[in-house]
Amino acid sequence: MSRIPADFLVENAARLYSMGGGGTSPRRGSELRQVGIFEPGAVAARGGRIVAVGTTESVRDRVQILPGAEVEDAEGHAVIPGLVDPHTHAVFTTARSEEFGRRLVGESYQSIAADGGGIRASVRDFREAREGALVEVTRRRLRAMLRYGTTTVEVKSGYGLSVEAELKALRVLRTLSEEAELPTVVRTCLAAHEFPDEFRDRREDYVDLVLSEILPRIVEEGLAERVDVFCEPGVFTVDQARRVLVRGRELGLRATVHADELEGSGGAALAAEVGADSADHLGCIDEGGIDALSNSSTVAVLLPGTIFSLGLDHWAPARRLIDAGAVVALATDFNPGSNYCESLPLTMSIACTRLGLHPHEVLNMATVNAAHALRLSEEVGSLEVGKRADLVILREATIDGTLHHLGLEAVQATYLGGHRVYLRREG
């Protein structure tokens, strides 16, 4: 039997989590414990695509290592697929760190927002920022994500809230999505993130602006793949959110929804109704929302880091969602205010300790199911033949050890398409 040529090989992983064996469907219920372990494990690729995965001995038997190939011995370390972060707000000016202290002494997120802080404060800064400066600062954040093992990331606009400022945000993301040594970027238009100051007393006029000008311009210029809306009491109503999502669908944009975060809104049921990629947050989801998601392909994306950062205690009901049969994923919600954190490994640890989840479950949620939330499951989310060779070598020998070791710089090396883009410095 002829051997398969390979120009990339990682071998002798203490434990390789392929996440394979589940077919093309997302993981539900007890399937979340399936992680496809090989000990010692190896993965080989050619031209950025995986050609073999399995035990080191079996992969070595099947592949021919080409001259000049990149070969890495991962002995003593675990290997996992590149992490997928399906919900971030990474394009902004500066963090709202002063609000962190205000929250710690008793002010609520909602009261700070009503006082002109929160998203509205970020909007004022963002509108004044130069596009080039935004490219530079967002590039640094995406590079930081590679250090935490994230190889695919969704990034939203939403701090512009005007035609030109929303276009500016998405142009920044388009520029960065064309750079080879950054995570793969999925671009989402979140013009319906909040009502800008100039529209506070005429909210329907702003909804009309989103429907008639912002979304058509974004589609005309090819700046986004998806549309999002913050469906929450005090922000966009269910009716307004539905109109935004339906208009986006008419224009060819897939949908996702900020749903049931701080209060119940019916956002999760709306996401299932319109066939959205995902319903995100879900800290206050009701039984009707759980039932709607469990009977749909819409992914429940949980953001426990945000509840942790805000110091709240209404955690999303992860186990109820899993037991009901919903597809559940994890994301950081990296943003300048309510969760200033790029680290998916930390988010995964919080999910274990605060949502009562097993490390294997959260690994599925941050790989296989997160890829489904972005409709990229044919490309990423597992180490299987034909998929992109996006993978991470961890510092620990297991995912259990990684998530148990709080505060650890979890990643030893990150690879995009079989090419190393991050290596941790020792010491």
Image: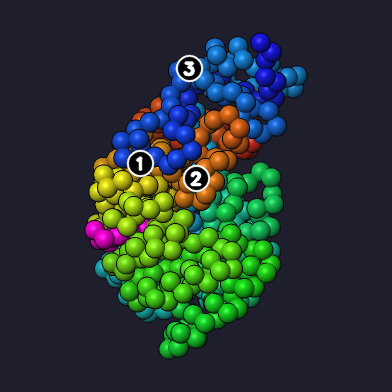
The residue tagged 3 is 40
Does 155 appear above or below 378? below
| Structural distance between the alpha carbons of marks 1 and 2 | 14 Å
Number of the front mark, 2 or 3? 2
Q: Is residue 170 visible?
A: yes
Please check the rendered image and state whether residue 285 is part of the magenta-colored stretch, yes or no.
yes
What amino acid is found at the position of numbered circle 2 in the picture?
Answer: Ala
Q: What whole-number distance in Å separates the C-alpha atoms at marks 2 and 3?
A: 26 Å
Considering the numbered disc 3 on the image, is that residue within a helix, a strand or a loop?
loop
At mark 2, the secondary structure is: helix
> Hey, what amino acid is under mark 1?
Arg
For marks 3 and 1 on the same chain, the one whose residue lies earlier in the sequence: 1
* Mark 1 secondary-structure assignment: loop
Q: Select label 3 or label 1 by which is in front.
A: 1
Residue that carries the numbered disc 1 in the rendered image: 28
Q: Is residue 14 visible?
A: no
Circles 1, 2 touching at the beta carbon (< 8 Å)? no
Question: Which of the 4 image quarters holds residue 275?
Answer: bottom left
Q: Residues within 10 Å of mark 1 (few under 14, many from 20)?
A: many
Q: Nearer the viewer, residue 330 or 257?
A: 257
Q: Which residues are magenta?
A: 281-289
